[in-house]
Image: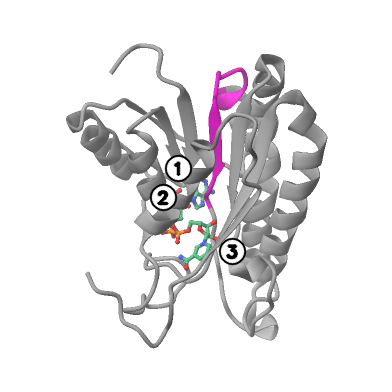
Amino acid sequence: MTASLPTALVTGASRGIGRAIALRLANSHEILAVARSTTELDTLASEIDARGGRCRPIALDVTDGDAVARTLGGQAVDVLVNNAGVGALKPFLELAPEEWRRMVDVNLNALYHVTRAVLPGMVERGRGDVVNIGSIAGRSAFVGGSCYAATKWAVMAFTESLMLEVRDAGVRVSVVMPGSVATHFGSGQAKDWNLLPEDVAESVAHIVAAPPEVLIHRLEVRALSPKRPRRR
Ligand SMILES: NC(=O)c1ccc[n+]([C@@H]2O[C@H](COP(=O)([O-])OP(=O)(O)OC[C@H]3O[C@@H](n4cnc5c(N)ncnc54)[C@H](OP(=O)(O)O)[C@@H]3O)[C@@H](O)[C@H]2O)c1
């Protein structure tokens, strides 16, 4: 590895999809791994280090706008992956105000904090990738998704609007919309047909590796069929 690796900042890197994205991008990037769980981040950093890569763990609550601006503002970031997300998937009448607020804070408001901190540097340098992790719930409704799906629809609108704003400055803005992925997300149990976190990571790597003048703006990634258990 050389000192001139591009930098990729991944939020929600302590587990699940974000962890897989950090590991995948570490093949070609120095990783800034953001989440609240320090032990998990340290384990990730050791794993990347053992593979010959570089990873700097950053313990940070992405909903704390001041802390995000203080910690991430001015960092030279080539690739930002806004992945951190939470889901309380339950009928609207059972949704507590705190659950609603937390989903909006993590899934939507944090996109403002983190993107606002690193985007100016990308615009200044005339290049960069912002990859947001949306969801198929960002274009289709489901029972129990009144807030979660709403936040992911918002991610779609944020992504497309931002893309239109900064494309001429050389910054590519994309969204990956996975179907169900085998993680500890929400309260649901992973199914044997679910996507793996590594599948989503591969899509992110594909977007980032596109030729500089090409923008892969939106990728919807599904398991082939819920009737076909995945061969592992
Ligand atoms: N799993 C699915 O079926 C699925 C499908 C489509 C889309 N997605 C999306 O994929 C993304 C990742 O989900 P996942 O399945 O990997 O979930 P996960 O396994 O529960 O991981 C969520 C990650 O978000 C981080 N996070 C949560 N709140 C945070 C906060 N306030 N500050 C910083 N980090 C925070 C967590 O880290 P700490 O707790 O350590 O802070 C963790 O690393 C989410 O945006 C989700 O909406 C998931």
Q: Decide: marks 3, 1 in contact (CB < 8 A)?
A: no
Residue range of the region highlighted in magenta in the rendering: 71-84
Q: What residue type is labelled 3?
A: Ser
Query: Which quadrant of the figure has residue 25?
Result: top left
CA gap, disc 3 and disc 1 = 17 Å
Q: Decide: marks 3, 2 in contact (CB < 8 A)?
A: no
Quick one: label 2, few (<14), some, or many (20+) residues within 10 Å? some
Q: What residue type is labelled 2?
A: Glu
Mark seen at residue 205: 1
Quick one: label 1, few (<14), some, or many (20+) residues within 10 Å? some
Residue 8 locus on image (x, y percent): 47, 31
Q: What residue type is labelled 1?
A: Ala
Q: Disc 3 or 2, which lies upstream in sequence? A: 3
Q: Does the residue labelled 3 lie within 8 Å of ligand 1?
A: yes
CA gap, disc 3 and disc 2 = 16 Å
Residue 218 locus on image (x, y percent): 64, 53
Residue 151 locus on image (x, y percent): 69, 62
Residue toward you, 100 or 225: 225
Residue for badge 3: 135
SS at mark 1? Answer: helix
Quick one: label 3, few (<14), some, or many (20+) residues within 10 Å? many
Q: Decide: marks 1, 2 in contact (CB < 8 A)?
A: yes
Residue 17 visible in image? yes
Q: Is residue 17 above or below residue 48?
A: below
For the C terminus, the image quarter is: bottom left
